């Protein structure tokens, strides 16, 4: 096998960036496992460095064996992924069976819809599928994406592998004593019980179906608020799938290879690992059999590494101990992991100043599996200068989501200042999800304004109008309080330019004013200041217009006293 590996390295003289990843993976790998056959117990690869673990390790595969075949050292020809391309297009290893490729891409789209911040690439699913099962045994699936017989890993009985006692009564893996990794993405039954998905809509969560398994793998990799566009998060995700640095290197090398180009091949025609070595089963104390891992290949040159150089005085340098890989951070169960925060039907947020908004801000939280998430704290915050607050006079409130995942903010009370503001909903701590809603406050309005009496307004030149003017504004028949009203004195309402003579108001210094901005009181009433006549007799008009467009025109008359004839002598 070592000679085979060296031949592959020589063949790839024209290396690309993939070569570096391949060499790194080869440096720690054992011989490639045998292709999983019908009813096989799996490959011969144990987690590198003795990193296999039990269920407490929280690894999707239970750290079961996996393929170690590596991508070629040359970049594929990037033909794309058209279903019309023949299998011979591009390098054979870059071909992915049609149904398998479709499942990976569907999983990417589905996760992007519920957890876009994860940025799951389908090529990562393809890399894991290649390493775990050779793309479902080269794409041997039926029209629904299900393998004709289960793909099973070895019994995880502690004999060279992790010790995981049966958790499913053999329902998935046919083994009622120990668990086995199952399906094209090699989930152990206890992990599948939590993460299993129905991605093909047949009403079943089947680990042997590539669509179901690919979506489950995608959601599992995204757990814990990971962003897979960040290298450290991607490494943690892969290690959570199988806690082995060799596994990480192998997956990484296929991931880089598929990113450089793939093409679609017919189902059943995918390339399986070359030069397989078949594991030899050994008998366990309980009478079951498990495969014995094949020995690791010799180091290049066929000899073990020599000890370090002699120290002065004749001693030898101790062999440096390898730096242990820190265990990946535990990931919370998907049911407890916030996947998305979405609008739960909030309509337009608009209210008149001082009024109460008819709509309430409502969001729905979903967990990493896409199911409604209950009892999740959601914080709502008002931002803006309109003076709008939640019921109770608060700018920020926190509520818990209900059983259907919805969280409803308290009613909004509009401030007195018109304008725009926002309401932001925030949930989650590790990687918070936020939604922002635009809202607005409109000025108070009146659709009618009338005088409260009908007395004629007459004054002599230079005198004050004796009768005060009082008006009432209404909106939909009710008193319109706090409505802005503009009063303008003009010569002719058909030509509403401010007049420079005739009746006027006075400012604090006693100077004439012919335009005033006024506001109705709590009862919708408006009492005008005193009006004065100047020395210009005639008929004038006072135009009052409300916010909302209501208008009333009042006539004002300035008339000189009639001259009387002097008495006859």
Image (tube, rainbow, N blue to C red):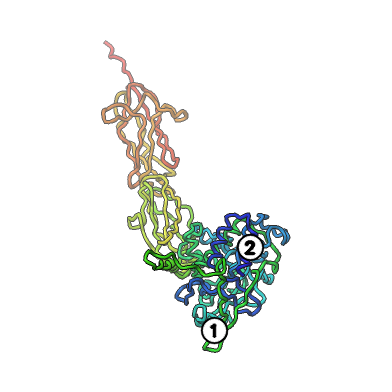
User: Quarter of the image containing the C terminus?
Assistant: top left
Residue for point 60% across, 64% down:
70
Q: Position of residue 43 (x, y in %)?
A: 59, 75
Q: Position of residue 190 (x, y in %)?
A: 51, 77
Kindly state the secondary structure of the residue where label 2 is placed: helix
Residue for point 58% across, 60% down:
123
The disc label shown at residue 43, or none: none
Relative horizontal placement of residue 31, taking residue 507 as reference (left or right) = right
User: Quarter of the image containing the N terminus?
Assistant: bottom right
Relative horizontal placement of residue 146, taking residue 233 as reference (left or right) = right
Residue sitting at the far top: 569
Towards the viewer: 170 or 406: 170
Q: Give the vertical position of 470 relative to 179 (above or below).
A: above
The residues tagged by marks 2 and 1 sit, at their Cα atoms, a distance apart of 44 Å
Kindly state the secondary structure of the residue where label 1 is placed: loop
What residue would you read off at disc 1?
169
Label 2 CA crowd tier, 10 Å (few <14, some 14–19, many 20+): some
Q: Earlier in the sequence, mark 2 or mark 1?
A: 2
Marks 2 and 1: which is nearer the front? 2
Label 1 CA crowd tier, 10 Å (few <14, some 14–19, many 20+): some
Q: Position of residue 375 (x, y in %)?
A: 41, 68
Q: Position of residue 448 (x, y in %)?
A: 43, 43
Occupied quadrant, residue 184: bottom right
What residue would you read off at disc 2?
8
């Amino acid at each position: 096998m070592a000679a085979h590996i060296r031949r592959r390295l020589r063949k790839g003289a024209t290396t690309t960036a993939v070569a570096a990843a391949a060499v790194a993976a080869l440096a720690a790998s054992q011989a490639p496992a045998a292709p999983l056959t019908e009813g096989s117990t799996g490959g011969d690869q144990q987690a590198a460095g003795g990193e296999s673990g039990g269920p407490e390790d929280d690894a999707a595969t239970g750290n079961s064996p996996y393929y170690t075949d590596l991508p070629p050292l040359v970049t594929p020809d990037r033909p794309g992924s058209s279903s019309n391309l023949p299998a011979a297009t591009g390098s054979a290893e870059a071909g992915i069976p049609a149904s398998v490729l479709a499942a990976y891409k569907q999983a990417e789209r589905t996760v992007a819809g519920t957890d876009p911040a994860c940025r799951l690439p389908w090529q990562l699913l393809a890399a894991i599928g290649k390493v775990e099962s050779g793309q479902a045994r080269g794409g041997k699936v039926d029209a629904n994406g299900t393998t004709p017989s289960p793909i099973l890993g070895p019994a995880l009985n502690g004999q060279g592998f992790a010790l995981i006692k049966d958790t499913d009564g053999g329902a998935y893996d046919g083994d009622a004593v120990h668990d086995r990794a199952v399906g094209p993405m090699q989930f152990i039954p206890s992990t599948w019980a939590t993460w299993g998905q129905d991605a093909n809509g047949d009403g079943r969560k089947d680990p042997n179906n590539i669509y179901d398994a690919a979506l489950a793998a995608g959601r599992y990799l995204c757990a814990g608020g990971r962003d897979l566009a960040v290298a450290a998060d991607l490494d943690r995700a892969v290690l959570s799938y199988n806690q082995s640095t060799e596994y990480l290197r192998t997956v990484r090398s296929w991931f880089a290879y598929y990113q450089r180009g793939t093409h679609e091949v017919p189902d059943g025609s995918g390339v399986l690992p070359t030069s397989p070595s078949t594991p030899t089963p050994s008998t366990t104390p309980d009478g079951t059999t498990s495969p014995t891992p094949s020995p690791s290949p010799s180091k290049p040159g066929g000899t073990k590494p020599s000890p370090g150089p002699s120290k002065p005085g004749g001693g030898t340098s101790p062999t440096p101990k390898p730096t242990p890989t820190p265990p990946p951070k535990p990931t919370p169960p998907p049911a407890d992991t916030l996947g998305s925060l979405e609008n739960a039907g909030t309509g337009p947020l608009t209210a008149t100043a001082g009024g109460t908004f008819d709509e309430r801000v409502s969001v729905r939280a979903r967990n990493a599996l896409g199911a409604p998430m209950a009892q999740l704290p959601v914080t709502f915050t008002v931002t803006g200068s309109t003076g709008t607050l939640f019921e109770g006079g608060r700018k920020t409130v926190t509520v818990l989501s209900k059983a259907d995942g919805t969280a409803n903010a308290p009613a909004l009370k509009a401030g007195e200042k018109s304008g725009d503001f926002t309401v932001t909903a925030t949930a989650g701590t590790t990687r918070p999800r936020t939604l922002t809603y635009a809202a607005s406050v409109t000025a108070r309005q009146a659709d009618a304004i009338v005088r409260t009496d009908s007395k004629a307004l007459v004054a002599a030149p230079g005198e004050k109008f004796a009768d005060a003017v009082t008006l009432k504004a209404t909106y939909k028949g009710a008193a319109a309080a706090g409505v802005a009203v503009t009063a303008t004195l003009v010569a002719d309402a058909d030509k509403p330019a401010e007049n420079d003579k005739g009746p006027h108001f006075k400012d604090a210094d006693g100077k004439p004013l012919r335009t005033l901005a006024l506001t109705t009181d709590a009862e919708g009433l408006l009492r005008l200041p005193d009006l004065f006549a100047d020395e210009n007799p005639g008929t004038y008009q006072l135009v009052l217009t409300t916010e909302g467009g209501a208008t009333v025109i009042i006539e004002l008359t300035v008339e000189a006293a009639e001259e009387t004839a002097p008495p006859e002598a």
